[in-house]
Amino acid sequence: MIVEERLRAMGVGLPPPLVVPSGARLPFAPVRIVGDRAIVSGHGPQNADGSSAGPYGKVGAQVSVEEAYGAARGTALSILGDLSRALGDLDRITAWVRVFGMVASAPGFDRQPAVINGFSDLILEAFGSEVGAHARSAVGMAELPFGLPVEIEAEVVFAP
Amino acid sequence: MIVEERLRAMGVGLPPPLVVPSGARLPFAPVRIVGDRAIVSGHGPQNADGSSAGPYGKVGAQVSVEEAYGAARGTALSILGDLSRALGDLDRITAWVRVFGMVASAPGFDRQPAVINGFSDLILEAFGSEVGAHARSAVGMAELPFGLPVEIEAEVVFAP
Amino acid sequence: MIVEERLRAMGVGLPPPLVVPSGARLPFAPVRIVGDRAIVSGHGPQNADGSSAGPYGKVGAQVSVEEAYGAARGTALSILGDLSRALGDLDRITAWVRVFGMVASAPGFDRQPAVINGFSDLILEAFGSEVGAHARSAVGMAELPFGLPVEIEAEVVFAP
C-alpha cells in the first residue's frame, strides 16, 4: 500500500463511490478493465461524502485558474478512489498511460495546461516519475456535464 | 449471430457504409483493427440508405435532448454496422472498452450524459451488461463536422 | 529509415523537441510507451528551432481552412519528431491506431475534417495505406492552449 501511504502522508483522502442525485443513473462503468488495462470514465472532483464537488462554471469566468487547479487535483483523487476499488490496491498500477484533461473554458481562456497540472502533479507525487509518467492533452470544452469546470478521463495498465 | 438477432428483435437495422457527398473523401478507416482491439472513428447517425442523418444543430438550441438521444442511438447503429463489416460477426466482441460521446452544445447546455445514454442504453440492451459495460465520457463540443449534434468514438476488444 | 527517407523526398524535416517558454513546465511525457503501444500527447506545429509555430486563433475566423490544414500537417511532423526520438526509428511503427484531431472552431465552423486531412494526408503519404491507416475523429473545440488552432493526439503500435 505504498501509494496509499504516500497519499496519507500528503494529507489527502480518497472519496467513496460517486453519489448521484435521486433518479439519476449511470449506464456505464467508472472503470472498465480489459486485460491489463484499466480505462477510466470521465470524472470530476468529489466531496468526502461522495457527492459531486464544486466549484461550477467556466474557467476564465466564474472559476479561477487556481480553483480549477484544485478541481483537477480533486479529480485525481476521485479517479484514484475508483481505481483503488477496481484493482484492490493502487500499487498494482505499473504505468499511467493517457490523461485527457477537459476544461470548460470561457471565451479566450487558453491556459488549460495550468489547470490540468493539478491532476498531473498529484499523480507524479503519488506514483513517482516512472510509473506516473503519462501522455496528456489539456483542452478547452464548450460545456461539461452539470457545470463542471474540469473533467478528466484516463488509462492505466496494471500487474495481474 | 446472437447480437444481430437481438437487434432485429428490438426492431432496429444496421445501415450500410457511410455514403459521402460527391467529391468528399475519408482519408481514414471507419474501424481500425490492431491485435484484438477495434478502434472506431467518430461516427454520427445514418439513414437506411447510408447517408448522414439529421437532425443538425446544437443540442439545447435547434435540437432537443430527446432528438439528440435518438441521434446517439442512431450513432450506435452506425458503429455496429461498421463493426459488423470489420469483424464479420458482432458476437466476436468480447468487451466494450471506451465510449467518447461528444455533444455539440448550445451555451449553458450541460445534460450531455442524458444524450449519450441513447448510445449506452442500446449497447447494453444488445450486448448485455457484462460485454456491453464501458468506460465513458459525455462532453460538450463547440462544433462538430457538418452540423452534427452528436459524434461518438469508441473501442471494443474481440475474440480471434 | 524508409519513412524518414520518404519524408526527406517529400521535402519536409522533423523538428527538435518542443522549446517551451522560460518558466513553463511539462509534467507529462510527449510520448508514453507501454508494451507495444506509443501514446502521443496533444501536439501542435513547431518551427524548425523547436518553438511553437503559428498561426494562432480560431479556424473560421482568424485562421483559414488552408492555414489550418498546414498547421495539421505541421503537427504531424511534430509528432513524428517525438516518435522518432522515442522509438529510435519510425520504421518500427507497424500501425497507426487512433488520431484525435481537435480544431479550435469559430461559431458555425464545421469543416474540421478538411483541417485534419492535413495530418492524415501526410501520414498516409509517409507510411503508406496499410501502416498509415487510422481511426480518426475531427472535432471542434471551444479553446486550445496558447491559442493553437489545431491540436492532435494519437496512438501507434510498434515492433519490438
Image (spheres, coloured by chain):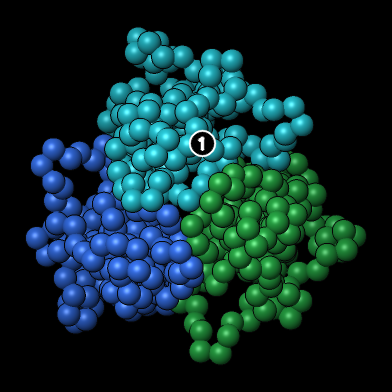
Chain colours: A green, B blue, C cyan
Which sits in the foreground, C107 or A67?
A: C107
Q: Name the residue under label 1.
A: C148
**Label 1 crowding class (10 Å Cα cut-off): few <14, some 14-19, many 20+?**
many
Question: In this orientation, does residue B17 appear?
Answer: no
Q: What residue type is labelled 1?
A: Leu
Q: Which residue is drawn at 44% across and 40% down?
A: C58
| Residue A77 visible to the viewer | yes
Q: Which quadrant is home to the N terminus of chain C?
A: top left
Chain letter, disc 1 residue: C
Give the vertical position of B15 relative to C94 (above or below).
Answer: below
Eyeballing the image, is C55 above or below A18? above
- Report the front residue among B48 and A131: B48
Percent x, y of residue B93? 34, 62
Please report the residue visible at 40 percent of the width from the left and 33 percent of the height from the top: C63
Left or right of C55: which side holds B120? left
Q: Which residue lies furthest to the bottom in this view?
A: A22
x and y, in percent, of residue B20 in the image: 15, 47
The residue that appears at 60% across and 22% down in the rendered structure is C51
Vertical placement of C31 versus A72: above or below?
Answer: above
Locate residue A110, reporting x and y percent: 59, 44
Locate residue A32, reporting x and y percent. 52, 65
Residue B101, quarter of picture = bottom left
The number of callouts visible is: 1
Q: Look at 63% across and 58% down and name the residue there.
A: A61
Residue C12's place in the image compared with B88, above or below, is: above
Helix, strand or loop at disc 1?
Answer: loop
